[in-house]
Amino acid sequence: MTIQNYDPKKEELLKLIDSRPRVKISKSDIIEGVICGIKNGVILVNVNGKSEGIISGRELASEDYDVKSLNIGSKIFVYVLSTEKEKEGQLNLSLKRADTAKKWIELENAKESQELVEALVVDANTGGLLVKVKGGIPAFIPTSQIDSVRLAEGFGLDESADESRSEMNSRIPFRLSQFIGQKLFARVIEVVKDKNKVVLSEKVSLSKTDIEARDDVFRNAQQGDVFDAVVTGVTTFGLFVNAQGMEGLVHLSEISWDKVSDPSDYYKVGDKLKVQLMNVAEDGKRVAFSVKRLIPDPWLNSGSYKAGTTVEGIIQKINNFNVHVKLKDGVNGVIHLSEFTEPPKVGESYEFKIFSISNLERHLNLTFSDEKVQSRIAKAKKKTTA
Protein backbone atom coordinates (compact mmCIF):
# COMPACT_ATOMS: atom_id res chain seq x y z
CA MET A 1 0.00 0.00 0.00
CA THR A 2 1.35 3.42 -0.87
CA ILE A 3 1.39 6.28 1.56
CA GLN A 4 -1.80 8.29 1.39
CA ASN A 5 -0.90 11.94 1.12
CA TYR A 6 -2.91 14.64 2.77
CA ASP A 7 -6.34 14.73 1.22
CA PRO A 8 -7.17 18.26 -0.03
CA LYS A 9 -10.77 17.71 1.04
CA LYS A 10 -9.55 17.27 4.60
CA GLU A 11 -7.44 20.40 4.65
CA GLU A 12 -9.94 22.45 6.60
CA LEU A 13 -10.23 19.73 9.24
CA LEU A 14 -6.48 19.37 9.50
CA LYS A 15 -6.01 23.13 9.70
CA LEU A 16 -8.49 23.20 12.53
CA ILE A 17 -6.53 20.46 14.30
CA ASP A 18 -3.24 22.25 13.78
CA SER A 19 -4.74 25.50 15.09
CA ARG A 20 -5.57 23.93 18.45
CA PRO A 21 -3.08 24.59 21.24
CA ARG A 22 -0.48 21.89 21.73
CA VAL A 23 -1.17 19.64 24.67
CA LYS A 24 1.19 17.95 27.06
CA ILE A 25 1.26 14.23 26.36
CA SER A 26 2.37 11.69 28.94
CA LYS A 27 2.95 7.95 28.83
CA SER A 28 -0.22 5.87 29.48
CA ASP A 29 -2.54 8.72 28.46
CA ILE A 30 -5.60 7.92 26.39
CA ILE A 31 -6.14 10.72 23.90
CA GLU A 32 -8.16 11.42 20.79
CA GLY A 33 -6.38 12.00 17.53
CA VAL A 34 -7.02 12.30 13.80
CA ILE A 35 -5.42 10.03 11.21
CA CYS A 36 -3.22 12.09 8.93
CA GLY A 37 -1.36 9.37 7.03
CA ILE A 38 -1.57 5.64 6.27
CA LYS A 39 0.99 3.26 4.82
CA ASN A 40 1.48 -0.51 4.95
CA GLY A 41 1.73 -1.45 8.62
CA VAL A 42 1.83 2.15 9.88
CA ILE A 43 -0.80 4.75 10.78
CA LEU A 44 0.20 8.37 11.44
CA VAL A 45 -1.96 10.24 13.95
CA ASN A 46 -2.14 13.94 14.77
CA VAL A 47 -2.70 14.21 18.53
CA ASN A 48 -1.80 17.90 18.87
CA GLY A 49 1.60 17.03 20.23
CA LYS A 50 4.98 18.25 19.09
CA SER A 51 5.01 15.56 16.47
CA GLU A 52 2.72 13.02 14.89
CA GLY A 53 2.25 9.69 16.59
CA ILE A 54 2.86 6.29 15.02
CA ILE A 55 0.80 3.11 15.36
CA SER A 56 2.42 -0.01 13.94
CA GLY A 57 2.63 -3.79 14.19
CA ARG A 58 0.49 -5.57 16.74
CA GLU A 59 -0.56 -2.25 18.25
CA LEU A 60 -2.91 -1.86 15.28
CA ALA A 61 -5.11 -4.72 16.55
CA SER A 62 -8.44 -3.35 17.77
CA GLU A 63 -11.88 -4.53 18.80
CA ASP A 64 -13.31 -1.00 18.70
CA TYR A 65 -12.20 -0.12 15.18
CA ASP A 66 -12.16 -1.88 11.82
CA VAL A 67 -8.58 -0.92 10.97
CA LYS A 68 -9.04 -1.67 7.25
CA SER A 69 -11.84 0.88 7.04
CA LEU A 70 -9.90 3.72 8.69
CA ASN A 71 -9.09 6.68 6.44
CA ILE A 72 -7.30 9.98 6.63
CA GLY A 73 -9.45 12.25 8.76
CA SER A 74 -10.87 9.44 10.89
CA LYS A 75 -11.00 10.25 14.60
CA ILE A 76 -9.64 7.55 16.93
CA PHE A 77 -8.70 7.10 20.56
CA VAL A 78 -5.13 5.97 21.16
CA TYR A 79 -2.97 4.89 24.09
CA VAL A 80 0.43 6.57 24.52
CA LEU A 81 3.17 3.93 24.67
CA SER A 82 6.09 6.37 24.73
CA THR A 83 6.66 10.09 24.22
CA GLU A 84 9.23 11.92 22.12
CA LYS A 85 11.45 12.28 25.16
CA GLU A 86 11.50 8.56 25.86
CA LYS A 87 12.29 6.94 22.53
CA GLU A 88 14.32 8.61 19.78
CA GLY A 89 12.01 11.60 19.61
CA GLN A 90 9.17 9.38 18.40
CA LEU A 91 5.61 9.36 19.74
CA ASN A 92 4.45 5.71 19.81
CA LEU A 93 0.75 4.98 20.07
CA SER A 94 -1.51 1.92 20.35
CA LEU A 95 -5.08 1.12 19.36
CA LYS A 96 -4.92 -2.26 21.09
CA ARG A 97 -4.01 -0.88 24.49
CA ALA A 98 -6.51 1.95 24.15
CA ASP A 99 -9.21 -0.70 23.82
CA THR A 100 -8.04 -2.41 27.01
CA ALA A 101 -7.57 0.83 28.94
CA LYS A 102 -11.06 1.98 28.03
CA LYS A 103 -12.46 -1.32 29.26
CA TRP A 104 -10.79 -0.76 32.63
CA ILE A 105 -12.34 2.71 32.76
CA GLU A 106 -15.72 1.16 31.92
CA LEU A 107 -15.26 -1.33 34.77
CA GLU A 108 -14.46 1.50 37.19
CA ASN A 109 -17.58 3.33 36.03
CA ALA A 110 -19.65 0.14 36.36
CA LYS A 111 -18.43 -0.26 39.93
CA GLU A 112 -19.49 3.28 40.80
CA SER A 113 -22.89 3.04 39.09
CA GLN A 114 -23.61 -0.55 40.23
CA GLU A 115 -24.25 -1.41 36.57
CA LEU A 116 -24.56 -5.09 35.64
CA VAL A 117 -21.78 -6.48 33.43
CA GLU A 118 -21.90 -9.66 31.37
CA ALA A 119 -19.35 -12.32 32.33
CA LEU A 120 -18.36 -15.50 30.49
CA VAL A 121 -17.30 -18.36 32.78
CA VAL A 122 -14.02 -19.82 31.49
CA ASP A 123 -12.83 -21.88 34.46
CA ALA A 124 -13.59 -22.78 38.07
CA ASN A 125 -11.70 -23.72 41.21
CA THR A 126 -12.56 -24.37 44.86
CA GLY A 127 -12.73 -20.63 45.51
CA GLY A 128 -15.13 -19.58 42.77
CA LEU A 129 -15.53 -18.83 39.07
CA LEU A 130 -12.93 -17.42 36.67
CA VAL A 131 -14.64 -15.25 34.08
CA LYS A 132 -13.95 -12.83 31.21
CA VAL A 133 -15.59 -9.40 31.11
CA LYS A 134 -15.56 -6.49 28.68
CA GLY A 135 -14.24 -8.56 25.80
CA GLY A 136 -11.42 -10.37 27.58
CA ILE A 137 -10.43 -8.82 30.91
CA PRO A 138 -10.06 -11.64 33.49
CA ALA A 139 -12.21 -11.40 36.60
CA PHE A 140 -13.21 -13.57 39.56
CA ILE A 141 -16.50 -14.36 41.31
CA PRO A 142 -15.87 -15.88 44.78
CA THR A 143 -18.13 -18.76 45.78
CA SER A 144 -19.57 -16.59 48.54
CA GLN A 145 -20.71 -14.07 45.89
CA ILE A 146 -22.42 -16.56 43.56
CA ASP A 147 -26.20 -16.45 43.54
CA SER A 148 -27.40 -18.82 46.28
CA VAL A 149 -30.11 -20.41 44.15
CA ARG A 150 -27.71 -20.98 41.22
CA LEU A 151 -25.24 -22.64 43.57
CA ALA A 152 -27.85 -24.78 45.28
CA GLU A 153 -29.60 -26.10 42.16
CA GLY A 154 -28.95 -29.78 41.63
CA PHE A 155 -27.60 -30.62 45.09
CA GLY A 156 -30.76 -32.41 46.24
CA LEU A 157 -29.92 -32.22 49.95
CA ASP A 158 -32.48 -33.08 52.59
CA GLU A 159 -30.41 -33.63 55.73
CA SER A 160 -30.09 -31.33 58.75
CA ALA A 161 -28.79 -27.79 58.27
CA ASP A 162 -25.22 -28.56 59.34
CA GLU A 163 -25.06 -31.75 57.27
CA SER A 164 -26.44 -29.90 54.26
CA ARG A 165 -23.76 -27.24 54.42
CA SER A 166 -21.05 -29.88 54.81
CA GLU A 167 -22.40 -31.87 51.89
CA MET A 168 -22.72 -28.73 49.77
CA ASN A 169 -19.15 -27.65 50.51
CA SER A 170 -17.79 -31.04 49.44
CA ARG A 171 -19.62 -30.84 46.13
CA ILE A 172 -19.02 -27.18 45.30
CA PRO A 173 -15.97 -27.77 43.00
CA PHE A 174 -18.01 -30.14 40.82
CA ARG A 175 -21.02 -27.81 40.85
CA LEU A 176 -18.89 -24.81 39.84
CA SER A 177 -17.30 -26.72 36.95
CA GLN A 178 -20.78 -27.09 35.45
CA PHE A 179 -20.96 -23.32 34.91
CA ILE A 180 -18.02 -23.25 32.46
CA GLY A 181 -19.14 -21.81 29.13
CA GLN A 182 -22.19 -20.09 30.63
CA LYS A 183 -22.83 -16.35 30.63
CA LEU A 184 -24.13 -14.54 33.69
CA PHE A 185 -24.64 -10.98 34.88
CA ALA A 186 -22.91 -9.59 37.94
CA ARG A 187 -21.85 -6.34 39.56
CA VAL A 188 -18.30 -5.07 39.96
CA ILE A 189 -17.27 -4.85 43.62
CA GLU A 190 -13.48 -4.40 43.28
CA VAL A 191 -11.14 -3.09 40.57
CA VAL A 192 -7.35 -2.92 41.00
CA LYS A 193 -5.87 -2.23 37.56
CA ASP A 194 -2.22 -2.32 38.68
CA LYS A 195 -2.72 -5.89 39.90
CA ASN A 196 -5.00 -6.85 37.01
CA LYS A 197 -7.65 -7.69 39.61
CA VAL A 198 -11.42 -7.54 39.10
CA VAL A 199 -13.89 -9.08 41.56
CA LEU A 200 -17.58 -9.51 40.74
CA SER A 201 -20.69 -10.44 42.70
CA GLU A 202 -24.04 -11.86 41.65
CA LYS A 203 -25.44 -11.12 45.10
CA VAL A 204 -24.86 -7.34 45.13
CA SER A 205 -27.94 -6.22 43.25
CA LEU A 206 -29.04 -3.23 45.25
CA SER A 207 -28.67 0.52 44.84
CA LYS A 208 -26.30 2.43 47.09
CA THR A 209 -29.23 3.53 49.24
CA ASP A 210 -30.46 -0.06 49.52
CA ILE A 211 -26.97 -1.30 50.39
CA GLU A 212 -26.66 1.29 53.15
CA ALA A 213 -30.08 0.27 54.48
CA ARG A 214 -29.11 -3.41 54.37
CA ASP A 215 -25.83 -2.76 56.19
CA ASP A 216 -27.76 -0.85 58.84
CA VAL A 217 -30.06 -3.87 59.29
CA PHE A 218 -27.00 -6.14 59.67
CA ARG A 219 -25.46 -3.88 62.30
CA ASN A 220 -28.60 -3.77 64.41
CA ALA A 221 -30.00 -7.26 63.83
CA GLN A 222 -30.08 -9.61 66.82
CA GLN A 223 -30.93 -13.27 67.19
CA GLY A 224 -34.68 -13.64 67.56
CA ASP A 225 -35.58 -10.52 65.55
CA VAL A 226 -38.53 -10.90 63.18
CA PHE A 227 -38.43 -9.58 59.59
CA ASP A 228 -40.73 -9.34 56.62
CA ALA A 229 -39.16 -11.41 53.84
CA VAL A 230 -39.66 -12.58 50.26
CA VAL A 231 -38.85 -16.07 48.97
CA THR A 232 -36.12 -15.75 46.32
CA GLY A 233 -35.45 -19.45 45.75
CA VAL A 234 -36.85 -22.89 46.58
CA THR A 235 -34.56 -25.93 46.78
CA THR A 236 -34.88 -29.48 48.07
CA PHE A 237 -33.22 -28.50 51.35
CA GLY A 238 -34.95 -25.22 52.11
CA LEU A 239 -35.94 -21.71 51.12
CA PHE A 240 -33.70 -18.80 50.20
CA VAL A 241 -35.23 -15.53 51.38
CA ASN A 242 -34.42 -11.84 51.31
CA ALA A 243 -35.28 -10.09 54.56
CA GLN A 244 -34.77 -6.34 54.20
CA GLY A 245 -31.57 -6.90 52.21
CA MET A 246 -30.32 -9.85 54.24
CA GLU A 247 -30.16 -12.99 52.12
CA GLY A 248 -30.37 -16.25 54.03
CA LEU A 249 -31.65 -19.80 54.24
CA VAL A 250 -34.69 -21.26 55.93
CA HIS A 251 -33.69 -24.91 56.18
CA LEU A 252 -36.50 -27.41 55.56
CA SER A 253 -36.34 -28.34 59.25
CA GLU A 254 -37.26 -24.72 60.08
CA ILE A 255 -40.16 -24.30 57.64
CA SER A 256 -42.86 -26.05 59.66
CA TRP A 257 -43.40 -28.14 62.77
CA ASP A 258 -44.63 -30.84 60.38
CA LYS A 259 -42.23 -33.25 58.70
CA VAL A 260 -41.26 -31.28 55.56
CA SER A 261 -40.09 -33.39 52.65
CA ASP A 262 -40.61 -30.88 49.82
CA PRO A 263 -40.34 -27.12 50.58
CA SER A 264 -42.20 -26.33 47.35
CA ASP A 265 -45.32 -27.79 49.00
CA TYR A 266 -45.25 -24.80 51.34
CA TYR A 267 -43.85 -21.82 49.43
CA LYS A 268 -42.95 -20.61 45.94
CA VAL A 269 -40.64 -17.84 44.65
CA GLY A 270 -42.16 -14.42 45.31
CA ASP A 271 -44.20 -15.47 48.36
CA LYS A 272 -44.11 -13.03 51.26
CA LEU A 273 -43.63 -14.35 54.78
CA LYS A 274 -42.28 -13.48 58.20
CA VAL A 275 -39.01 -15.02 59.38
CA GLN A 276 -37.09 -15.06 62.63
CA LEU A 277 -33.33 -14.52 62.62
CA MET A 278 -31.54 -17.55 64.07
CA ASN A 279 -27.88 -16.92 63.30
CA VAL A 280 -25.49 -14.73 61.31
CA ALA A 281 -22.03 -16.12 60.50
CA GLU A 282 -19.00 -15.19 58.39
CA ASP A 283 -19.80 -11.46 58.36
CA GLY A 284 -23.24 -12.01 56.90
CA LYS A 285 -22.26 -14.56 54.26
CA ARG A 286 -24.30 -17.23 56.07
CA VAL A 287 -27.63 -16.18 57.56
CA ALA A 288 -30.12 -18.66 59.00
CA PHE A 289 -33.82 -17.90 59.42
CA SER A 290 -36.80 -19.81 60.77
CA VAL A 291 -40.49 -19.72 59.91
CA LYS A 292 -41.81 -22.37 62.29
CA ARG A 293 -40.54 -20.61 65.40
CA LEU A 294 -43.11 -17.89 64.78
CA ILE A 295 -45.88 -20.53 64.87
CA PRO A 296 -47.16 -22.13 68.11
CA ASP A 297 -45.59 -25.54 68.62
CA PRO A 298 -48.41 -28.12 68.40
CA TRP A 299 -46.36 -30.54 70.50
CA LEU A 300 -46.95 -28.32 73.50
CA ASN A 301 -50.56 -29.55 73.39
CA SER A 302 -49.59 -33.20 73.07
CA GLY A 303 -50.12 -33.75 76.80
CA SER A 304 -53.77 -34.46 76.13
CA TYR A 305 -52.84 -37.67 74.31
CA LYS A 306 -52.70 -40.91 76.28
CA ALA A 307 -51.48 -44.39 75.43
CA GLY A 308 -54.42 -46.52 74.24
CA THR A 309 -56.37 -43.58 72.82
CA THR A 310 -57.79 -43.89 69.30
CA VAL A 311 -56.83 -41.01 66.98
CA GLU A 312 -57.42 -40.15 63.34
CA GLY A 313 -54.55 -39.12 61.11
CA ILE A 314 -53.53 -38.57 57.49
CA ILE A 315 -50.49 -40.26 55.96
CA GLN A 316 -47.93 -37.59 55.15
CA LYS A 317 -44.77 -39.48 54.15
CA ILE A 318 -43.71 -43.10 53.58
CA ASN A 319 -40.15 -44.43 53.70
CA ASN A 320 -38.59 -47.89 53.76
CA PHE A 321 -39.64 -48.68 57.31
CA ASN A 322 -41.97 -46.06 58.77
CA VAL A 323 -45.10 -44.18 57.82
CA HIS A 324 -45.35 -40.59 59.05
CA VAL A 325 -48.81 -39.45 60.07
CA LYS A 326 -50.22 -35.98 60.72
CA LEU A 327 -53.02 -35.68 63.27
CA LYS A 328 -55.70 -33.03 62.92
CA ASP A 329 -54.11 -30.59 65.40
CA GLY A 330 -50.66 -30.76 63.81
CA VAL A 331 -49.08 -33.34 66.10
CA ASN A 332 -47.06 -35.97 64.23
CA GLY A 333 -47.14 -39.72 64.62
CA VAL A 334 -45.15 -42.68 63.31
CA ILE A 335 -46.27 -46.24 62.58
CA HIS A 336 -44.17 -49.12 61.23
CA LEU A 337 -44.86 -49.96 57.60
CA SER A 338 -45.24 -53.67 58.42
CA GLU A 339 -48.50 -53.00 60.30
CA PHE A 340 -50.38 -52.24 57.07
CA THR A 341 -52.10 -55.20 55.39
CA GLU A 342 -52.12 -53.22 52.09
CA PRO A 343 -49.62 -50.62 50.84
CA PRO A 344 -50.65 -47.23 52.27
CA LYS A 345 -50.84 -44.06 50.17
CA VAL A 346 -49.98 -40.46 51.02
CA GLY A 347 -53.15 -38.53 51.78
CA GLU A 348 -55.14 -41.51 53.04
CA SER A 349 -56.86 -41.24 56.42
CA TYR A 350 -56.81 -43.98 59.08
CA GLU A 351 -57.74 -44.54 62.70
CA PHE A 352 -54.76 -45.47 64.84
CA LYS A 353 -54.08 -46.51 68.41
CA ILE A 354 -51.48 -44.55 70.40
CA PHE A 355 -48.86 -47.09 71.40
CA SER A 356 -46.52 -44.68 73.24
CA ILE A 357 -45.47 -41.03 73.35
CA SER A 358 -41.90 -39.97 72.50
CA ASN A 359 -41.10 -36.53 73.87
CA LEU A 360 -37.52 -36.86 72.64
CA GLU A 361 -38.54 -37.52 69.03
CA ARG A 362 -41.58 -35.25 69.34
CA HIS A 363 -44.05 -37.76 67.91
CA LEU A 364 -46.65 -40.35 68.88
CA ASN A 365 -45.83 -44.00 68.24
CA LEU A 366 -48.91 -45.49 66.56
CA THR A 367 -50.23 -49.00 65.95
CA PHE A 368 -53.31 -50.89 64.74
CA SER A 369 -52.87 -53.67 67.30
CA ASP A 370 -55.02 -53.59 70.47
CA GLU A 371 -52.86 -56.38 71.93
CA LYS A 372 -49.74 -54.32 71.44
CA VAL A 373 -51.35 -51.33 73.15
CA GLN A 374 -52.63 -53.32 76.09
CA SER A 375 -49.26 -54.99 76.56
CA ARG A 376 -47.54 -51.62 76.56
CA ILE A 377 -50.01 -50.14 79.06
CA ALA A 378 -49.64 -53.16 81.35
CA LYS A 379 -45.85 -52.87 81.29
CA ALA A 380 -46.06 -49.15 82.08
CA LYS A 381 -48.40 -49.78 85.05
CA LYS A 382 -46.19 -52.54 86.37
CA LYS A 383 -43.17 -50.23 86.17
CA THR A 384 -44.91 -47.42 88.09
CA THR A 385 -46.13 -49.71 90.89
CA ALA A 386 -42.83 -51.48 91.34
Image (cartoon, rainbow, N blue to C red):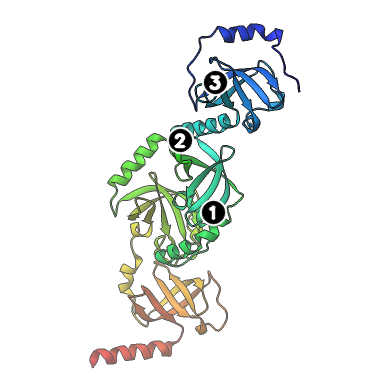
Q: Residues within 10 Å of mark 3 (few under 14, many from 20)?
A: few
Say which residue appears at 39% left-offset and 61% top-offset.
254
Say which residue appears at 59% left-offset and 7% top-offset.
16
Q: Mark 1 points at which residue?
A: 124
**Residue placed furthest toward the right:** 1
Q: Mark 2 points at which residue?
A: 111
Locate residue 257, reporting x and y percent: 39, 64
Question: In front: 373, or 54?
Answer: 54
Question: In front: 279, or 112?
Answer: 112
Say which residue appears at 41% left-offset and 63% top-offset.
161
CA gap, disc 1 and disc 3: 47 Å
Locate residue 205, reporting x and y percent: 46, 41
Numbered circle sitting on residue 89: 3
Residue 135: image quadrant is top right
- Residue 162 in the image: above or below residue 192: below
Q: Type of residue at label 1? A: Ala
The reply to whether residue 189 is in sight is: no
Indicate which label's residue lies in the foreground, 2 or 3: 3
CA gap, disc 1 and disc 2: 23 Å
Could you tell which of marks 2 and 3 lies nearer the N-terminus?
3
Locate residue 170, reporting x and y percent: 48, 64
CA gap, disc 2 and disc 3: 38 Å
Numbered disc 3: secondary structure: loop
Numbered disc 1: secondary structure: strand
